Image (spheres, grey):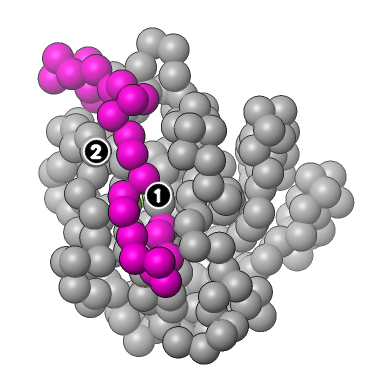
Amino acid sequence: MSMKQNRFPKRLFITGTDTGVGKTVISAILMAGLRGTYWKPVQCGLGEMTDTEWVRVKTGLPETNFHRETYRLKLPISPHASAAQEGAHIDLDDFRIPETKESEHLIVEGAGGIMVPLNERHFMLDLMKKLNIPVFLVMSSSLGTINHTLLSLEQLRMHGLDVDYVVMNGPKNSSNREAIEYYGKVCVLAEIEPLPFINPKILAQSFKQYFEHAQ
Ligand SMILES: Nc1ncnc2c1ncn2[C@@H]1O[C@H](COP(=O)(O)OP(=O)(O)O)[C@@H](O)[C@H]1O
Ligand SMILES: [Mg+2]
């Protein structure tokens, strides 16, 4: 590992402006490049592939690079509702940052966006505050993203969470990027364009292409 790679924070919380914006794909790119460990604290939906399985299969990294989810809920709906459906209750006290080796990166992927409820009084935001690790916000490049992104940035800041990284995912849209940088007072670290295939090689190449300059 080069010295450069040590500059990415040891721990990153990958959140998004919405569900389906590319948190898992970006997590896989980071995992392929940093060869760290991955943790999805709350998984809703066990039907097809969980996010943990997807990142494992697509990166080809060994199972030992993956921590077990704290909550594995069956229905692919909001965590508060998915838990309620099976008579469970999400308790913030149950979440502990997994132990990692000194040199190892930890990629934590949230569920949905910031204001997704976990129970009757806590949101994903509260879990982020509790874990207190650098925040990496994934947003879409398409129409609607300015509103979603500015709202997310404002809410995070209002709660004292600095957003360390902001990345745009989807077909390049420089007008949206510029608006988000100007109104959101952030620097967009990378604009990730749709990947033709997703395999370990392409993920590692994408890390080089999009994140090496951040190192
Ligand atoms: N840059 C990309 N290239 C190719 N497919 C992508 C890209 N970003 C997202 N996708 C696809 O879009 C869908 C949603 O992305 P995903 O990473 O699962 O979002 P999230 O984790 O935020 O819910 C998935 O099918 C994923 O493979
Ligand atoms: Mg995901």
Name the residue beneath numbered marker 2: 70
Q: Residue at x 28, y 22 (%)?
A: 90
As drawn, is 122 to the left or to the right of 37?
Answer: right
Residue 183 in the image, given as x and y percentages of width and height = 84, 45
**Element assignment for label 2:** loop
Which is nearer the eye, 158 or 173? 158
Residue 178 in the image, given as x and y percentages of width and height = 81, 58
Which is nearer the eye, 147 or 156? 156
Q: Amino acid at mark 1?
A: Glu
Name the residue beneath numbered marker 1: 109
Q: Is residue 199 visible?
A: yes
Q: Main secondary structure of the magenta part?
A: loop
112 lies above or below 122: below
Instruction: Please identify the residue farthest to the top as the structure is shown.
Output: 120
32 lies above or below 152: below
101 lies above or below 46: below
